[in-house]
Image (cartoon, rainbow, N blue to C red):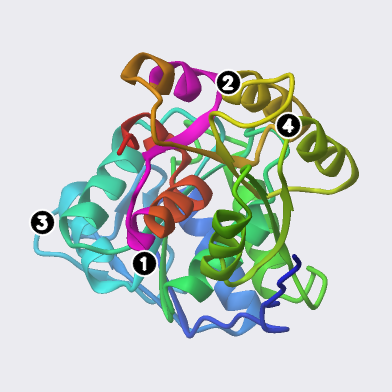
């Protein structure tokens, strides 16, 4: 079974928001100016930044407060979605607060870490924008003094995502591993937007995994073959460290689910589950990898 719904040739955003701080904020605003994308955002009263005053070429509005918290909150509130760039997986300070604000306002968010092995940062950002129909994108991350490499990471990712540097069509690939053909067909129908391969046994699945790039793997715990669900998760994560792996089972204990999470699964679902539960786990795995430890249903 193969299903493919490809992304549009160009994913467009209408405006970029940011707070004007050195580092990630400035890199996003500079990118917007160079690409002719309108930009705006909230900055602290007095246009305060760690290097003095935010340059006047950045068209930002001042908040009533001279502190950074109100700026962070209002940019998350007034955008359609937020992307937070960091160098490592660690979320600290303003970057962590930005995500907390996005959650509080019910806005979608994405965390991209430069040192996450094998991650397709630009592809994830494009899909995040497309899936959530984001027109106004809030960009945040550490200041320049805390992460000197962050500006280059932000600029290269935004350029690849929105300035045509990616291939015209980006296909997300999924692998379904289950011994019930009807479930494999059902998963394939649910996962619109993915090119889907399926397998009955772990051995068949690993042959596929060795031949193809994978963005998503949905695997049962019990199925024919030499490897159980946990052994298979370990093997597929070794081949594809950045792939999102979801384990689905009708009988796995809580301790087994915890072991699956430790091995790299982003979610453990208990059969039967709702379609919306699977889609939420897929979105969390692709866009919010740090939330994986909480995804047990």
Q: In the figure, 74 relative to 240: above or below?
A: below
Along the viewing direction, whichever of 66 and 152 lies nearer the viewer:
152
Q: Viewer-proximal residue, 179 or 249?
A: 179
**Residue 105: x and y, percent?**
17, 62
Disc 1 crowd, CA 10 A, few/some/many (<14, 14-19, 20+): many
Front: mark 2 or 1: 2
Q: Residue at x 44, y 28 (%)?
A: 90
Up/down of 96 relative to 57, above or below = above
Left or right: residue 242 versus residue 97 is: right
- On the image, the x and y values in percent for residue 174 come to 67, 54
Q: Which residue is mark 3?
A: 65
Which residue lies under the disc numbered 1? 81
Q: Are marks 4 and 2 in contact (CB under 8 Å)?
A: no
Q: Secondary structure at mark 4?
A: helix
Residue at mark 4: 202
Tell me what residue is drawn at x 43 percent, y 46 percent. Answer: 288
Q: Residues within 10 Å of mark 3 (few under 14, many from 20)?
A: few
Residues under labels 4 and 2: Cα distance?
A: 11 Å
Q: Which residue is mark 2?
A: 230
Query: Is residue 263 at least partly visible in the picture?
Result: yes
Q: Nearer the viewer, residue 65 or 84?
A: 84
Location of residue 227 by image quarter: top right
Instruction: Give the image location of residue 24, x and y in percent.
Output: 50, 50
Nearer mark to the viewer, of 4 and 3: 4
Q: CA distance from mark 2 to mark 1?
A: 35 Å
The Cα atoms of the two marked residues, 3 and 2, are separated by 51 Å
Tag nearer the camera, 1 or 3: 1
Q: Neighbour class for label 2 at 10 Å: few (<14), some, many (≥20)?
A: many
Label 4 to label 3: alpha-carbon separation: 57 Å
Q: Residue at x 50, y 65 (%)?
A: 128
For discs 4 and 1, the disc positioned in front in the rendered view: 4
């Amino acid at each position: 079974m193969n299903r493919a719904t490809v992304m549009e040739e160009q994913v467009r955003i209408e405006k970029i928001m940011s707070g004007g701080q050195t580092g990630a904020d400035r890199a996003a605003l500079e990118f917007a100016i160079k690409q002719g994308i309108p930009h705006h955002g909230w900055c602290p009263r007095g246009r305060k930044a760690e290097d003095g005053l935010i340059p006047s070429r950045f068209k930002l509005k001042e908040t009533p407060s001279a502190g950074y918290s109100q700026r962070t909150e209002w940019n998350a509130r007034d955008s359609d979605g937020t992307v937070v760039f960091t160098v490592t997986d660690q979320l600290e300070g303003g970057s962590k607060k930005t995500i907390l604000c996005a959650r509080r306002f019910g806005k979608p968010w994405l965390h991209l870490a430069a040192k996450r092995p094998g991650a397709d940062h630009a592809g994830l950002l494009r899909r995040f924008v497309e899936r959530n129909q984001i027109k106004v994108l809030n960009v945040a991350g550490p200041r320049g003094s805390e992460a000197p490499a962050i500006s280059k990471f932000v600029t290269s990712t935004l350029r690849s995502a929105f300035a045509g540097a990616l291939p015209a069509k980006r296909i997300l690939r999924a692998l379904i591993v289950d011994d019930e053909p009807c479930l494999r067909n059902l998963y394939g129908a649910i996962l619109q937007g993915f090119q889907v391969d399926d397998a009955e046994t772990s051995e068949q699945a690993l042959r596929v995994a060795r031949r193809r790039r994978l963005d998503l793997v949905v695997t049962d715990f019990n199925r024919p073959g030499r490897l159980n669900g946990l052994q298979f998760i370990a093997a597929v994560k070794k081949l594809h460290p950045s792939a999102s792996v979801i384990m689905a089972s009708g009988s796995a204990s809580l301790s087994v689910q915890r072991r699956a999470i430790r091995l790299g699964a982003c979610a453990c679902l208990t059969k039967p589950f709702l379609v919306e539960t699977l889609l939420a786990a897929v979105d969390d795995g692709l866009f919010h990898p740090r939330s994986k430890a909480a995804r047990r249903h």
